[in-house]
Amino acid sequence: MNLSIPKETVAGEKRVALVPESLKKLIQLGYSVRVEAGAGVAAGFSDAEYKEAGADIVTSAADLFAKADILIKVQKPGAHPSGKHELEMLREGATYLGFFYSLGNPDLAVKAAAQKVTVISMDAVPRITRAQRMDALSSQTNLAGYKAVLVGANHLRKIFPLMMTAAGTVQPAKVVILGAGVAGLQAIATAKRLGAVVEVSDVRPAVKEQVESLGAKYIEPPAQEALEGQGGYAKEASAEYLRKQQEILSKHIGMADVVITTALVPGKRAPVLVTESMLQGMRPGSVVVDLAAEQGGNCEWTKPGETVERGGVIIVGDTNMVSHVAYHASQLYARNVATLLEAFTKEGQLVLDPEDEIIKGCVIARDGAVVHEATRALIA
């Protein structure tokens, strides 16, 4: 079977789905690897490196797609510059492996089934111990949390650390982080390393110990609803709960220099946690970095894909923060992919046991049907 790695076509996407270091292990498993010319250049990997690792370099995207047994991507399939949809460029019986986000794109799952393309969705890998090394969502959001702090620091017209000088003492920046998942925890660690005072809000009291172990202060939430969802995510809160939470957050956000928001609910629009009134209460020169921008944003003034300034407050709505660290993001993503393939390859063939817990969680479509239970429920 051949693994085919195309160029990513989404504007601003610099990652690549496999890097040269991951190829050798996959070739040893019995796969051949075909890489579209230039696929890794934006991430820092040359065609020569892929060739040296054992891959064939293909100049025609149409040929790469048409002959792919398993097409491996980062971004979900979409319109290709050739004019066709990427799923339509694949032959019947081929496999797509990459981010897919079927809960937010059930029509895409239907299209894949109609094309008789098998879909393995990296964002749907269950968060269980056996699948930790396959967890691409965690590897990517971890880097996004790191980069978000650096972006916030870059836009801020202050320094982060306490500094004692002959001219007097400079007080440390105050950073408020909303959400203590993978991205939020990395943001805490990064902001603390830069010397900021950090406060963290999360609707799950279970994360308090993790937050405090990193040296941050936990902002106690309102009287608790049951808001811990599957896979460690927060689930959607009631309007009343959000109102109470916003009242608590207003005071903390009004004193913040940088606010980093990370709250996501799978398959839903991101909850609005930073309201217009909160933003109006922030000091001029303050910065909001909204890591939920791709799903609408946690901040009421966020414009997905743009950085805007209103009332002196800078709001960063970058929808692909992790692409700014494309070299390591690609490296980690490739390791996630290689681990998954290694686990389910037998004698050079990818074997997807429908009874396996991981396969049941991440296979969205196969044999002409949408088989992922949660996605199928959205279609019915």
Image: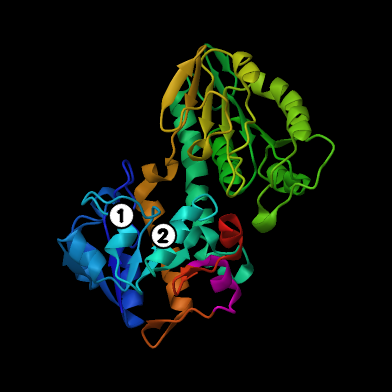
**Against 129, is 246 above or below?**
above
Which label sits on residue 111?
Answer: 2
In the image: residue 31, left or right of residue 351: left
| Element carrying mark 2 | helix
| Element carrying mark 1 | loop
Q: Amino acid at mark 1?
A: His
Nearest to N terminus: mark 2 or mark 1: 1
Q: Position of residue 77 (x, y in %)?
A: 37, 55
Please tell me which residue lies in front, 248 or 207: 248
Residue 359 lies within the magenta run: yes
Q: Please state the extent of the stretch shown in magenta in the rendering.
A: 354-364
In the image: residue 1, left or right of residue 54: right
What residue is pinned by disc 1? 85
The residue at the point 32 percent across, 83 percent down is 30
**Against 223, is 31 above or below?**
below
Visible in this render: residue 150?
A: yes
Q: Amino acid at mark 2?
A: Lys
The residue at the point 81 percent across, 34 percent down is 222
Visible in this render: residue 101?
A: no
